[in-house]
Image: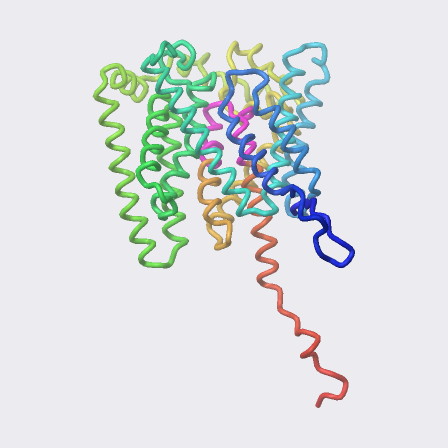
C-alpha cells in the first residue's frame, strides 16, 4: 500500500501541485533486496544481514500484516523447536557458548516467521525481488571464492580454507550450498526464456557453478545436480505448451554443455583436478571408525534416549570432541526430545508442503520451482552436515511456507462460487 504525501484542495483538486510521494512498497522491496544480498556476508560478525533484518522487519511491520491460519502450524513448530532448546539450556545458563547458541537460534526462527508472513502477501513481486537479490549475492560470493582460490591480489588467505574456496563464508561447505539457489535461478531463467541478457545469464551461471566446484564440497556437488534436475523437471511438467517444453529441453542441453565446459576448463588446472579427485574418492579421516563422524552419531543415539533434555545446546562436542555433523542428531542433542521431535515434524511437513506447492499449478509455481529444490537438498544435506544455523535455510523455510500459504488462499478464492450481482438477483415477484 503506497503511503502518499499528496495534498488535495477542498474541491478535490491538488492544492499547489503534488509534494513528494513515499511509495511504501518500493521502500520495502529495496530493503528486502539489501537484506537478501547481504546474506552472503558471513566473514563479519555481526553481519550486515543482522542489521538489515532489523531494518526490514521494522519497515514491513509499519505497513501492517496478516497472520493466515495456514502458517500457524509452521510458527508453532519452529517455536516449539526453540522452546525445547531453551529448556535444555536451563542447566547451563552460566555458560556463554550454549546461551549464545540459543539466542542465535531464536533470532533465526524469528527471521523464518518473518519471511513466511512476508511472502504470503504480494507473493509474486516479493519472490522476484528475493530471487534476484539472492542470485546477485551468489555471483559476488562465487567471484570472491574463485579469486581466493587462485590467490588473485593476495586474497587467498581471506577467501579460502584448507585449499578450498570459501568466498565470503567461513566454511567452503556453506559457500557451495549457498550458491545452489543462485545457479537454479539462472538455469530457470535460461530454460524459460525469462532473461533479456542471455550471455550475461550464462556468464553468471558459469561463475556460480565454478564457485560450487571450487568449494570442493561433495554435498554441494550432489545437491546442485539433484536440485537442478528437480527445477528442470518441475518446469517441464508444469508447462503444457509444446513450444515451451521444446525450449526447456534445448536450453537444458545448452546449460549442461556450459557446465561441462566449466568442468573441463577447471579440471585442466592440475591443483583443481587433484583436489577434485581426492574429494570424490577419498573418505576424510574424521568420517571413519568408531570415533569418526558417523561412529559418534551412532554412539550418541542410545545416550540421548536416556536424556529428555539431550546433552544441552552446543554440548555434543564435549562428549565426542567434534560437532555432530548431522542436524537431525543435533536436534535431539541440543534441543532435547521436545525440540528434536518438533524439528522432525517440521521437516516432514515441509517436505509434504514443498512438493505440493511445486506440483500444484498456481501463480507462484515459477518461484516455487527454485525455492523448494534448494531447500529440499539442504534438508537432505542435514544428514551429513549441521545446517541448523544457516541463515539461507531459514529464508527458504519461510519462503516455502509463505508461498504455500499464498497458494492455499489463491486456490480458495479460485474455487469459491461467484455470487450473482445485486442487479441480476431474483426479486420476490419473479416467476
Camera-side residue of 77 and 156? 156
Q: Is 85 on the left-hand or right-hand side of 371?
A: right
Is the residue 72 above or below the residue 276 in the image? below
Q: Position of residue 338 (x, y in %)?
A: 66, 29
Question: For the C terminus, which image quadrant?
Answer: bottom right
Which picture quadrant has residue 93? top right
Camera-side residue of 378 and 272? 272
Q: Position of residue 35 (x, y in %)?
A: 56, 30
- Residue at 63% of width from left, 12% of height from top? 97
Is the residue 155 above or below the residue 373 in the image? above
- Residue at 34% of width from left, 29% of height from top? 209
The answer to whether residue 67 of the structure is visible from this angle is: no
The answer to whether residue 369 of the structure is visible from this angle is: yes
Q: Position of residue 337 (x, y in %)?
A: 64, 27
- Residue at 38% of width from left, 33% of height from top? 224
Q: Is 135 on the left-hand or right-hand side of 48?
A: left
Camera-side residue of 7 and 281? 7
- Residue at 62% of width from left, 68% of height from top? 417
Which picture quadrant has residue 255? top left
- Residue numbers of the magenta segment: 375-396
Amino acid at each position: 500500500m503506497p503511503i502518499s504525501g499528496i495534498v488535495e484542495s477542498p474541491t478535490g483538486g491538488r492544492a499547489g501541485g503534488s509534494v513528494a510521494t513515499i511509495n511504501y512498497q518500493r521502500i520495502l522491496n529495496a530493503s528486502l533486496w539489501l537484506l537478501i544480498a547481504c546474506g552472503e556476508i558471513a566473514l563479519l560478525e555481526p553481519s550486515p544481514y543482522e542489521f538489515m533484518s532489523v531494518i526490514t522487519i521494522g519497515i514491513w511491520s509499519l505497513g501492517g500484516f496478516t497472520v493466515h491460519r495456514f502458517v500457524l502450524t509452521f510458527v508453532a513448530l519452529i517455536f516449539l523447536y526453540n522452546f525445547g532448546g531453551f529448556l535444555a539450556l536451563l542447566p547451563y545458563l552460566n555458560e556463554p557458548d550454549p546461551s549464545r547458541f540459543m539466542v542465535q537460534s531464536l533470532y533465526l526462527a524469528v527471521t523464518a516467521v518473518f519471511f513466511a508472513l512476508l511472502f504470503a502477501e504480494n507473493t509474486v513481486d516479493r519472490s522476484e525481488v528475493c530471487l534476484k537479490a539472492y542470485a546477485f549475492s551468489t555471483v559476488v560470493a562465487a567471484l570472491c571464492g574463485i579469486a581466493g582460490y587462485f590467490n588473485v591480489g593476495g586474497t587467498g588467505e581471506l577467501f579460502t580454507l584448507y585449499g578450498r574456496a570459501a568466498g565470503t563464508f567461513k566454511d567452503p561447505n556453506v559457500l557451495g550450498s549457498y550458491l545452489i539457489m543462485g545457479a537454479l535461478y539462472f538455469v530457470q531463467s535460461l530454460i524459460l526464456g525469462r532473461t533479456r541478457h542471455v550471455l550475461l545469464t550464462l556468464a553468471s551461471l558459469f561463475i556460480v557453478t565454478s564457485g560450487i566446484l571450487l568449494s570442493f564440497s561433495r554435498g554441494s556437488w550432489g545437491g546442485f545436480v539433484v536440485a537442478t534436475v528437480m527445477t528442470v523437471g518441475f518446469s517441464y511438467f508444469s508447462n503444457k505448451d509444446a513450444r515451451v517444453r521444446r525450449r526447456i529441453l534445448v536450453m537444458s542441453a545448452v546449460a549442461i554443455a556450459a557446465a561441462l565446459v566449466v568442468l573441463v576448463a577447471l579440471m585442466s588446472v592440475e591443483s583443481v583436478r587433484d583436489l577434485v579427485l581426492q574429494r570424490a574418492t577419498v573418505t576424510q579421516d574424521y568420517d571413519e571408525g568408531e570415533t569418526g563422524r558417523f561412529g559418534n552419531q551412532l554412539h550418541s543415539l542410545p545416550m540421548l534416549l536416556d536424556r529428555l533434555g539431550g546433552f544441552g545446546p552446543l554440548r555434543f562436542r564435549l562428549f565426542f570432541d567434534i560437532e555432530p555433523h548431522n542436524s537431525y542428531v543435533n536436534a535431539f542433542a541440543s534441543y532435547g526430545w521436545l525440540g528434536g521431535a518438533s524439528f522432525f515434524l517440521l521437516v516432514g511437513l515441509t517436505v509434504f508442503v514443498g512438493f505440493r506447492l511445486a506440483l500444484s499449478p498456481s501463480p507462484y509455481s515459477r518461484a516455487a520451482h527454485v525455492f523448494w529444490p534448494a531447500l529440499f537438498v539442504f534438508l537432505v544435506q542435514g544428514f551429513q552436515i549441521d545446517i541448523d544455523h544457516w541463515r539461507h535455510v531459514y529464508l527458504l523455510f519461510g519462503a516455502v511456507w509463505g508461498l504455500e500459504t499464498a497458494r492455499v488462499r489463491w486456490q480458495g478464492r479460485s474455487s469459491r462460487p461467484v455470487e450473482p450481482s445485486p442487479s441480476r438477483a431474483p426479486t420476490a415477484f419473479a416467476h
